[in-house]
Image (tube, rainbow, N blue to C red):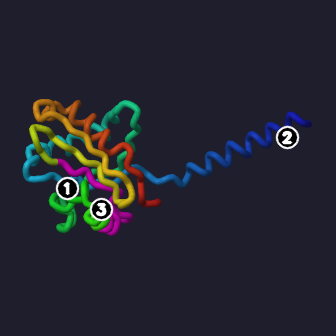
Amino acid sequence: MILTRKQTALSLSLLICASAHAGSPDGLNIAAIGDKSALVYANSVKQFFIDYTADGIECGDYALRLQNVHTNDLPPSLGSELALGAVSNQAKHKKLGKILTGFRSKALPHGYDGALAYEVRGGQLRMYGISGAADEKVVVVALPVSEASKQKKFNLAACKALASLPVLAQP
């Protein structure tokens, strides 16, 4: 009889844990925003998402969950000046966050969770993972330009920039 109660309690615990994950949100919805200095890497960003959906991308200790990465048809107010300014300016980060999370479309009924902003500066391709939540720290990853054209290295850098961003939109 005691064994049956323990089994029942264990089964109920497992059901509760399973139901807690049943409503968890899908992956990140990301707006990719490139500076004019990094336009040559726009196709690498698109290939990053293609590679992710085809095979997944291993990025060390980080687990990446992407739903969408949009490079085109972004709201006009999502420019590189605002995105790059959000890296070091809290007011711009807050403004960017409102634009990201407030955007709605058929493909994105809950808006964007964050942005992948990128620029070339000082001989490096710099990628910034910027959450739509203004209180989240911006993740900065730098890759030497000489390495940035290698898709696997590009993918790893983009993965590291995005992996720690939280999914903001609930399903």
Residue 84's label in the rendered image is 1
Do we see residue 50 in this rendering? no
Q: Amino acid at mark 3?
A: Gln
| Residue 108 is one of the magenta-drawn residues | yes
Q: Does 71 sit left or right of 40 as displayed?
A: right
Q: In the rendered image, which quarter contains the N terminus?
A: top right
Do we see residue 90 in this rendering? yes
* Residue 32 horizontal/vertical position (percent): 22, 52
Q: CA distance from mark 2 to mark 1?
A: 58 Å
Q: Does 52 sit left or right of 24 as displayed?
A: left
Mark 2 or 3: in front is 3
Residue found at x 37% / y 51%: 28
Q: CA distance from mark 2 to mark 3?
A: 54 Å
Residue located beneath label 2 in the image = 5
Q: Amino acid at mark 1?
A: Leu
Residue found at x 19% / y 43%: 126
Among the two numbered marks 2 and 1 on one chain, the one whose residue lies closer to the N terminus? 2
* Residue 144 horizontal/vertical position (percent): 15, 33
Q: Work out whether residue 79 or residue 151 is closer to the camera in this orientation and state it.
A: 79
Residue located beneath label 3 in the image = 90
Within the image, what quadrant is residue 91 found in?
bottom left
Residue found at x 25% / y 48%: 128
Among the two numbered marks 2 and 3 on one chain, the one whose residue lies closer to the N terminus? 2
The crowding category of the residue bearing disc 3, from other C-alpha atoms within 10 Å (few below 14, some 14 to 19, many at least 20), is: few
Q: Amino acid at mark 2?
A: Arg
**Contact flag, marks 2 and 1 (Cβ < 8 Å):** no
Q: Work out whether residue 2 or residue 130 is closer to the camera in this orientation and state it.
A: 130
Q: Does 74 sit left or right of 132 as displayed?
A: left
Is 64 drawn above or below residue 104 in the view shown? above
Is 63 drawn above or below residue 97 in the view shown? above
| Residue 165 is one of the magenta-drawn residues | no
Residue most toward the right?
1
